[in-house]
């Protein structure tokens, strides 16, 4: 796929509708008498030990379907590493400083930041920590965001600078003015998000810059945190650059948004791979194959133990979605992505994210040889293969 596909893949969630996961996209209508899903719970100020040398803290986020992000604190003789340090802006930063204090640390004790993937509720505090402490930034080597010059296509990467919030907001607006890979216009980020982005960067300058990894990991590479070695696992699906870390000594897995305990992560159709859903299935299968897992530590929701079972459930969920698409073929013999989106999702969820996820499922079926694609009129249309 083209470079602009990769950029879109990483920035779909930067809208106000950032994480409409299973609750918004697939679940039954909300029931006032039902408890909220784990991932929707508000951030607690409590610090809890969830594995040997690892503390769970929670930072507040205000996004539909999510109430917190888990910022894990990994202790060692040098101080502490933090995993997924929340959104950009003072509110999240102040919460992070508070949680560090509750755990007995200062900002200056942070020597490493692990960012599981390129969504702002995970990387937002990374560069401010580096700015203040010189902390290393650990990501998968494919970590990308829409603001990187190479992803902006028409710009001259030798002169383009995107270091301020205003630059980033302008890049977003310019980028989302382009048509999607399946045809048609995209809604893009909301005015509220763009305004929040600009305000968040007003007082912090370079501390708000998009993180540049200082320790880019390849699949299978190890990194020492919490006094032991962790194995990097490239787990594309929710984003192409998603990183999980596996500790074989204690059986701990940092799952980020790849496997969550009670909601199904969004799968984007916009990646550098021809079949992102197949990539997602493959990386979920790796979770099933891990030996000796004692606890999975997700980026949202509570720690859980049956990582393989939960990964299998997510695979089965998407297999069911593929069957729904197959069942719609008689009524949509030359259907567009938008047509199939209306079959897969409730009206309240229609939009960029739902179209992208629908596109992933349609392209998967095309790669399997079950569908053909025609772009003759500038809009992708899918028909059963003869």
Image (cartoon, rainbow, N blue to C red):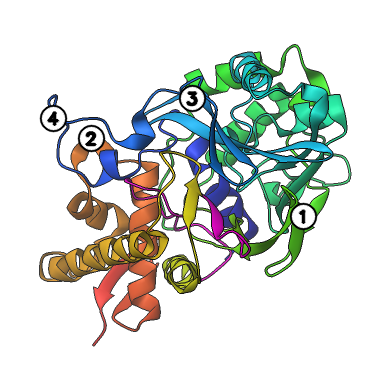
Question: Which one is earlier in the sequence, the residue at label 1 or at label 3?
Answer: 3
Q: Secondary structure at mark 2?
A: helix
**CA–CA distance between discs 1 and 4?**
44 Å
Q: Mark 3–mark 2 contact, CB under 8 Å?
A: no
The residue that disc 4 covers is 31
**CA–CA distance between discs 1 and 2?**
44 Å
The residue that disc 3 covers is 61
Question: Which one is earlier in the sequence, the residue at label 4 or at label 2?
Answer: 4
Question: Which one is earlier in the sequence, the residue at label 3 or at label 2?
Answer: 3
Question: Which one is earlier in the sequence, the residue at label 1 or at label 2?
Answer: 1
Mark 2 crowd level (few <14, some 14–19, many ≥20, 10 Å Cα): few
Question: Which one is earlier in the sequence, the residue at label 4 or at label 3?
Answer: 4
Residue 249 located within the stretch drawn in magenta = yes
**CA–CA distance between discs 1 and 3?**
29 Å
Q: Mark 4–mark 3 contact, CB under 8 Å?
A: no
Magenta stretch, main secondary structure class: loop
Identify the magenta region: 247-274
The answer to whether 328 appears left or right of 214 in the picture is left
Decide which of 187, 281 is in the foreground and name it.
281
Q: Secondary structure at mark 4?
A: loop
Residue 295 seen in the current view: yes
Q: Secondary structure at mark 3?
A: strand
Q: Which mark is residue 348?
A: 2
Question: Which one is earlier in the sequence, the residue at label 1 or at label 4?
Answer: 4
**CA–CA distance between discs 4 and 2?**
16 Å
Mark 4 crowd level (few <14, some 14–19, many ≥20, 10 Å Cα): few
Decide which of 59, 124 is in the foreground and name it.
59
Residue at the image point whose x is 59% and y is 14% from the top: 91
Mark 1 crowd level (few <14, some 14–19, many ≥20, 10 Å Cα): few
């Amino acid at each position: 796929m083209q470079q602009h596909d990769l950029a879109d893949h990483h920035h779909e969630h930067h809208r106000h509708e950032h994480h409409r996961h299973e609750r918004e996209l697939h679940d039954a209508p909300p029931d006032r008498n039902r408890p909220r899903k784990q991932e929707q719970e508000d951030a607690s100020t409590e610090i809890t030990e969830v594995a040997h040398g690892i503390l769970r803290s929670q930072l507040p986020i205000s996004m539909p379907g999510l109430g917190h992000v888990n910022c894990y604190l990994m202790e060692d003789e040098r101080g502490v590493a933090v995993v997924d340090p929340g959104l950009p802006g003072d509110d999240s930063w102040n919460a992070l400083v508070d949680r560090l204090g509750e755990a007995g640390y200062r900002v200056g004790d942070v020597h490493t930041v692990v960012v599981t993937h390129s969504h702002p509720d995970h990387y937002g505090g990374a560069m401010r920590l580096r700015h203040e402490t010189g902390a290393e930034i650990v990501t998968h080597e494919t970590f990308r965001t829409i603001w990187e010059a190479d992803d902006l296509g028409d710009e001259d990467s030798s002169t383009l600078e995107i270091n301020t919030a205003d630059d980033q907001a302008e890049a977003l607006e310019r980028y989302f003015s382009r048509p999607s890979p399946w045809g048609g216009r995209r809604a893009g980020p909301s005015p509220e998000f763009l305004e929040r982005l600009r305000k968040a960067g007003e007082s912090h300058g370079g501390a708000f810059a998009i993180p540049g990894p200082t320790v880019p990991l390849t699949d299978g590479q190890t990194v020492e945190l919490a006094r032991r070695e962790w194995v990097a696992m490239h787990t594309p699906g929710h984003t192409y650059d998603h990183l999980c870390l596996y500790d074989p000594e204690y059986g701990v897995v940092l799952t980020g948004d790849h496997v969550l305990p009670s909601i199904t992560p969004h799968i984007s159709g916009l990646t550098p791979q021809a079949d992102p859903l197949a990539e997602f299935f493959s990386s979920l299968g790796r979770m099933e194959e891990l030996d000796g897992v004692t606890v999975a530590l997700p980026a949202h929701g509570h720690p859980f133990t049956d990582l393989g079972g939960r990964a299998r459930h997510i695979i089965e969920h998407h297999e069911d979605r593929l069957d729904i698409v197959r069942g719609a073929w008689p009524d949509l013999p030359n259907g567009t992505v938008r047509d199939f989106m209306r079959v897969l999702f409730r009206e309240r969820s229609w939009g960029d994210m739902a179209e992208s996820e629908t596109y992933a499922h349609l392209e998967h079926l095309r790669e399997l040889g079950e569908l053909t694609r025609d772009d003759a009129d500038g809009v992708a249309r899918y028909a059963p293969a003869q």
